[in-house]
Each structure stands twice: as structure tokens, then as C-alpha cells.
Image (cartoon, grey):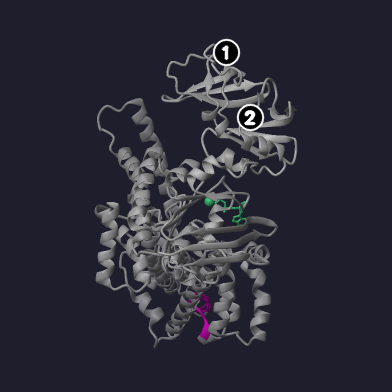
Amino acid sequence: MAEVILENVVKSYGSTLAVNRVSLTIKDGEFVTLVGPSGCGKTTTLNMIAGLIELTSGNIKIGNKIVNDLDPKDRDIAMVFQNYALYPHKTVYQNLEFPLRMRGVDKDKRHAQVMRAAEILGITALLDRKPRQLSGGQQQRVAVGRALVRDPAVFLMDEPLSNLDAKLRVHMRAELKHLQGELGATVVYVTHDQLEAMTMSDKVAIMNHGVLQQYGTPDEVFHKPANTFVAGFMGSPPMNLLSTMIEYVDGDPVLVGDGALRFRPKTPKIKAALQNAPSRRVILGIRHTAIPIVQNGAADDSADSVPAEIYTVEPTGDVTFVHVKVGEHLLVSSTNDLRFTGRIGDQVGLAFDESHIHLFDTETTHTLLN
Amino acid sequence: MSAITQGGSQAVAYPARRFGIKQRRALLRLTIIYAGTMVLALFAALPMVWMVSTAIKPRSDVFREPTTIIPTNATLENFIRVTEPLTPSGRYFGTYFLNSTIVSVASSVFSVMIAAPAAYAFSRFRFPGKQVAYFAILARNMFPLIVFLIPLFTLMTALQLVNTYAGLIIAYLTFTLPLSIWLLKGFFDGIPPELERAARIDGCTRFGAFVRIILPLTTPGLAATVIYSFVQAWNEFPYALNLAYSTNMRTLPVGMTFFFSENQSDWTGLMATAVIISIPVVIIFMILQRYFVSALTQGAVKA
Ligand SMILES: Nc1ncnc2c1ncn2[C@@H]1O[C@H](COP(=O)(O)OP(=O)(O)O)[C@@H](O)[C@H]1O
Ligand SMILES: [Mg+2]
């Protein structure tokens, strides 16, 4: 097992920067996920760690050694591909054995290691089959098996679950995470699915347009997003982002949006952030959980509740998402009240939970808090 | 694969009694298909039947009326006459056969050996001039062979390769390579690049991944390349006639025409030679076709 360090890694294809100055430290035994929309440079980054693509500039270190010019085979890594990349002309056994064979492991030891990996993944019964005789889930297991058969320093996985159906995906998510914990493996995992990133990772690296947006624990990136991109990407439904103006009433800052949207913070920290804001225009970010619906009449702290009109209602069983309109703003709120009876067009109140709001600079999109 | 066999067995397994409209229509369709196929097969087979039939007739029976397809007194005498080293008609047969074998085997071996890496490069790598080079290769097949005969002859004369194996092999490569490269590129394009990436991570060099993972998946393409190059070289006439004309360098097709002009009326001998020439082609087809079909039905590269 080993630490992986990326220092100002750049990959350009002609004039396009697929990966732009990415720096990351992946500690020994950590499960780190690269997440971001399609085309943001995740696969390119992973392939550079693997040695399948050359860096344009920067350094990659594995276990404190610069590996920029090392062949993939000399980096002590294993990789699981999105399409599994099982060798179609080899049996499952031969697929698992191949990395050991290529490294000159002797026959008895190969057999022992193949059987161990097969047992861990529960594919012992499939060893004589060819990949085309396996279901998608089984192929996926074999692909993981081929990676862990030789105990590499780092596991690289490129969307390994995205070709599975939803139910199997949830199951394999838990299984992979469990396996990683048991083996104490260092894993760099790529996905475009923020939920996968949140649930599996020790740390999440969010990328967009080849640029690393934020690197932190799932808790950090969810509760303290560094910019509007992270705020909008992590979490479902995404965080509400509203364009507002700072106005001053009796010397105190008040955020004014469209329609009746007014929000007067009380916390000194938020007040200070607004007073120090470089421009009067700021983006107010707030998740659905922090603007619960207060039904008409039931609003007790009515001073702070913002009047809104129901746009649509989405019950999901335990939570009901309520899309509401405040002036021109369309936001998502929610309620846990199972007897919620609001209908399209109803007037409701929204309570702003001040301890959970976010403020971003309109120009740079960076957070204005901390 | 299973879908095809199932469909096929259903089509034959119609119950004998109670033909509904649907069954009757299906039967009619089958009849038309089979009848059409048989006409085509007959069209292709008849000249060959005639060739074999004439080859095993005694010389005196060739023009006998009424013509028979199955000879009444079949003989192998013609085969002996045209191959017997001590007779005037058969003395060069061994030389011609050897020449043809050397040139054809070398052409097909070099075709595969050169076309496979070249096609792989065209499929996987970006390099300056790639489009132009690929077009230039394909452009070769837009012209009839004969157009290049005179330039090739001039070239071979300058290189002093006229009447050598090398000269003829190189000339043959000019038309077997373009098709082989094009064909193999198609196969490589169909293999997901992740397979060789996986192999490189599993411990192969780039070349090792090509040899251990990619080439085995390309077996049908390689077999097709071998068949095509061998058959083309084996049957080729105009290049052989002009680039290897000396008596000891002639290939079988060229030798056969000389045989015919020297032994004007020997139709049975000519047909016997033709039969012998066809045999290696049939054999190589039978051997490689098995690979071909099995590799195709396996759906080897479905990832
Ligand atoms: N071989 C290549 N040539 C040119 N552009 C490429 C190449 N590979 C990737 N790119 C570009 O780099 C960007 C990042 O691609 P990729 O890393 O595959 O994204 P992701 O895996 O996050 O979806 C994309 O805009 C893609 O078009
Ligand atoms: Mg990708």
C-alpha cells in the first residue's frame, strides 16, 4: 500500500486542457473519489496515475517515488475499467491468473492467489467460464478479482459500477467499500454519481472542466462547499442558488431577492461576511432541508418566514419535495410531514434556517464564508 | 448464435400434417430460397465439374459425342503425364510448383507480418500524415493490377529483381498489403482499447499486450488475410508472366499457359494441371475456414 501524490498535473490535447493543474494527496489506505460531470477530466486523471497517458506537465508520485516516466506495469497498480475489459478469449481463471503470470509468479502460488481472490468475491463456481458466459454483475466481480489478485499498492477504478442495474449497484457499492476496509487498500475511484462519491469515500475530489474544485471529506464538501459548482453538484436535489443584492436597513445588511424574498441575518459571522463582500451582488445558497415549508397559519416565527407559491409537489415516501416560487426564483423545499396537503398554487411560508445558509461571490463563485 | 440455430431448426421442424396458411407460405419461401441457391451453386460448380471430368478422361475421349460428364473409363494417366519429371510434358512441373509455393507462402506470411502492425498503428495511434498514408494505401486498390505492371517492371529491372522470388513477392505485396491492412484495421477498431490498457497494467509491455491479447482476438482477420494473400498470389498471372518469365522462375499459372502452347491439343493434360493447381487453395481454405467461422461465432470481441 502506498500514498499517491499529484502535483500540478496538466494534460492538454492540442488547445484543450483536459486536466488543469490538479494537486491531490491520497493517503495510504484512503478511499478517494474523483467526481464530476462527464468530460471533466476524471478518466484522464486516473489514466495518468496508471501511466496509460503521459502528463503534459506536473508530477505524480506513488509511494514517494516520481513515476512520471514509468510504464503502467512498473507502477504496482491495478485497475478496474468501466467496461470491465476482461480478456474475452481467456477463462475467468486465466483472466485472474494473467497479472500473476506476467509477473513470473510460480504456478502453485498463482493457483493459491487466484483461489483466494475468487473466494473473496464468491466467483469460485465461475472459474471455467468465458467472460461472455457471465452476467454483468459477475463480470464486474471478475474485474475486481483480477485487480486484487496480486495485492497492488494502489487500486484505480473507473466507474466500475455504472454498467450495473440500480439495485446491484447499491449492493456492490457496499461490498466494494467493505472490501476496501478489510484489505486496508488505497483506492482512487472515479464516478460521475455524487451519491456514490458521498457514500463510499473517505475523501472526495470534485472536478469541473479539468480543474479541481474542492478536495475534502464527504461531510466537508457537502456542508462547506467551496464554490457554487460544488454546492450545486453534491446533494440531490441540488442546493438552491439565488441571486440577491445586499441592502442596508438600520446599518444591518439584508439580502434582497426577487419578489418577497428578504432575508435579514442575525449571526455576526454572516453579517460580517456580507459587510466584507467585494460586491453588493451575492449568491445565496440554501439546501431544501434548511428552508422547510411552514404551512399557512402554522407559521410561528412569521417575522422570518418568506411567502411562496407551490409550483409542484414530489412525494418520495419519507420526504416530500416541494418546489416553490418566490417572485422569479424557483426553489426546492421539503417537508417530513406525511400529512402535507399542499397543492399547486397554494400559498405557503418558508422558514430560513440561518445556521445552514451559504454565501458565494457572484464573480468568482467562491464561498464568502470562512 | 443460438438464435440462428433455433430459427433454423424451427424452420425445418414444421409438423407434417395440417399446413396452415402461414406454414404454406413459409414453405414456399424456403423452396424459392433453396431453388435460387441451387441455381447459383450449379453455376459456380459446373465449370469445376467439367474441369475434373475432363482431367480424368483418356485423351481420346475428349471430343467424343455424346459428351459425358462422368467418364466411362476414368484414368489418372493425365495427372501422371503432366507431373512426371522424365517426360517432356511434365519435366518443369516440380519447378513451377515449388516456385508458386515459395512465392505464395512468402506473400501471405509477409502480408500478415507487415499488415498486422501497420493496421494496429492506423487503428490506435495518431501520427502526422496518418490520413494521407491510409488513403495512399487504399488508393492502390482503386486501380486494376495491370496499371502498375510497367512501373513495377521498370522498378524491378532497376533493382535487378526481375526473375527473382523477391521481385515477385514484393510485387504481390503491393496488392495484398492494402487489403490486409484495411481488413485488419477493421478488426482492431472493434477491440476496445481498454483491453490492452488492462494488459499493460497487468504486466505487459505495449508490444506484449498486442501479441498476447490483441492478436489472439484477431484470429479471424489474420486467417482471412492469409487466405486472401495466398490465393491471390497463387492464382496471379500477369505479374508472374512479366516479372518471372525465365523457365526456372515460372509459377504454375504461367507454366500452364506455356504447357498449353507447347502441347497444343492436350486438353486433358491442361485440365489435370488445373485440378492440381486448385488443390492447395482448397486445402488452405478448409484449414483456415474453421478458425474463421468459429472465431466469428464466438463473438470474440464483444465487451
Ligand atoms: N485522446 C483525446 N484526445 C482529445 N481529447 C480528449 C482525449 N481524451 C479525452 N479528451 C478530452 O478531455 C476531456 C476529459 O475527458 P475524460 O477524462 O474522459 O472525462 P471524464 O472521464 O471525466 O468523463 C474531455 O473534454 C475529452 O473530450
Ligand atoms: Mg470517464
Q: Residue at x 30, y 68 (%)?
A: B73
Helix, strand or loop: magenta stretch: helix
The quarter of the image holding the N terminus of chain A is bottom left
> Picture coordinates of residue A11 (x, y %)?
62, 60
Q: Residue at x 32, y 26 (%)?
A: B20
Specify whether residue B297 is painted magenta: no
Q: Pointer 1: what residue?
A: A346
x 68%, y 23%: residue = A328
Please provide percent x and percent y for residue B210.
Answer: 47, 68
Indicate the quadrant where residue A53 lies.
bottom right
What subunit carries mark 1?
A: A
Mark 2 residue CB less than 8 A from any atom of ligand 1: no
Q: Nearer the viewer, mark 2 or mark 1?
A: 2
Q: Residue furthest top?
A: A297
Give residue A293's mark.
none
- Against B125, residue B26 (above or below) is above
Which residue is nearer to you in this view: A147 or B52? A147
Element under disc 1: loop
Q: Which residue is mark 2?
A: A265
Label whose residue precedes the other's in the sequence (2 or 1): 2
Q: Which residues are magenta?
A: B249-261
Percent of width and height locating residue A34: 52, 51
Camera-side residue of A341 and B77:
A341
